[in-house]
Amino acid sequence: MTRIVTTIADWRELRVGMQEEIGFVPTMGNLHDGHLSLLKRAKNDNAVTVTSIFVNPTQFNNEEDFKRYPSTLDADIDKLQQLQVDYVFVPTYLELYPDNYEVQVHETLLSQELEGCFRPGHFDGMLTVVLKLFNIIMPKRVYVGEKDYQQFLLIKKMITSFFLPIELIACETVRSKEKLALSSRNSRLNAVQHEKANYFAELLSSSHSSADVVGLLQQIGIRVDYIEEKWGRRLGAIWVDDVRLIDNVKR
Ligand code: AMP
């Protein structure tokens, strides 16, 4: 049985008696096989598995994107039950932001490039909510996806900078058979848009130069925010009409 916890007070009461190692997977819900792979890994490594579902408004730099973010709580909870995840934390905005986001975590270097250039404030919101969740859940291990590679690096940096007693584990990106990285935003793509997204995934791992990849994507009407090689990977962010997708592959 997956227990649903909605308040910090309720979780703290449960947490007091918990001596076992806790594995934690923070999410924004609309769970797919990518999220489930992190949960399976957490279950494998820890006595207790906890996930959170919270669509964090402070990390959306675009109001429309926030409003349209898919919310599928009942289906998510069914999936968590099937996987036998122990707890899901589902807080409200007020529960997590009693200060109305007046206190923020801001990284000054890594957060300013790539995604940071195109999504101002995004990483501040992400780091702030992640630090809050870490302080509430108090896990031993945290599992994140390589799909959001810059996010993974920033969380790792925050853990080091703030001496958080947490082990961070990055898990490989789960893809469709066409090699498209699974993402909650994929559900907003129609058939034609899906084809374009598949082409993006194919090109990212191809031997074409990054400049050529940009050109080829633009030829089919895709707007490119960036295709860049960094950290031994090739990272990209594109727009298929009004849906923004990111991905990265090892080089
Ligand atoms: P989100 O709900 O999009 O905030 O994602 C929650 C966690 O799942 C993050 O650590 C993501 O990097 C990870 N994640 C999202 N998509 C995938 C995927 N396709 N494969 C592996 N992990 C993923």
Image (cartoon, rainbow, N blue to C red):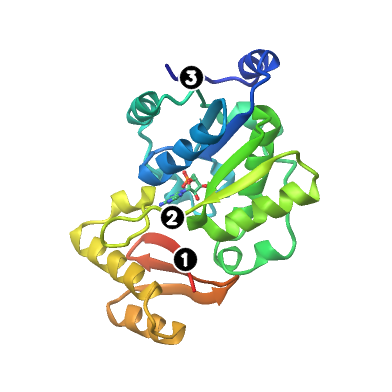
How far apart marks 2 and 1 lie (CA) works out to 9 Å
Question: Is 206 located above or below residue 47 in the figure?
Answer: below
Question: Residue 96 versus residue 101: which sits nearer the camera?
Answer: 96
Indicate which label's residue lies in the foreground, 3 or 1.
1
- Residue type indicated by callout 2: Thr
User: At 35% from the left edge and 30% from the top edge, which residue is drawn?
Assistant: 79
Q: Secondary structure at mark 2?
A: loop
Look at mark 3 in the image and give the residue it sits on.
Answer: 4
**Label located before the other in sequence (3 or 2):** 3
Note whether 190 is above or below 5 in the view shown. Answer: below
Residue wearing tag 1:
248
Q: Are marks 3 and 1 in contact (CB under 8 Å)?
A: no
Residue 8 at least partly seen = yes
Q: Amino acid at mark 3?
A: Ile
How far across and how far down the image is residue 70, in percent? Answer: 37, 41
Q: Is residue 249 left or right of residue 166?
A: left
Q: Which mark is on residue 71?
A: none
> CB of mark 2 within 8 Å of CB of mark 1?
yes
Q: Which residue is mark 2?
A: 173
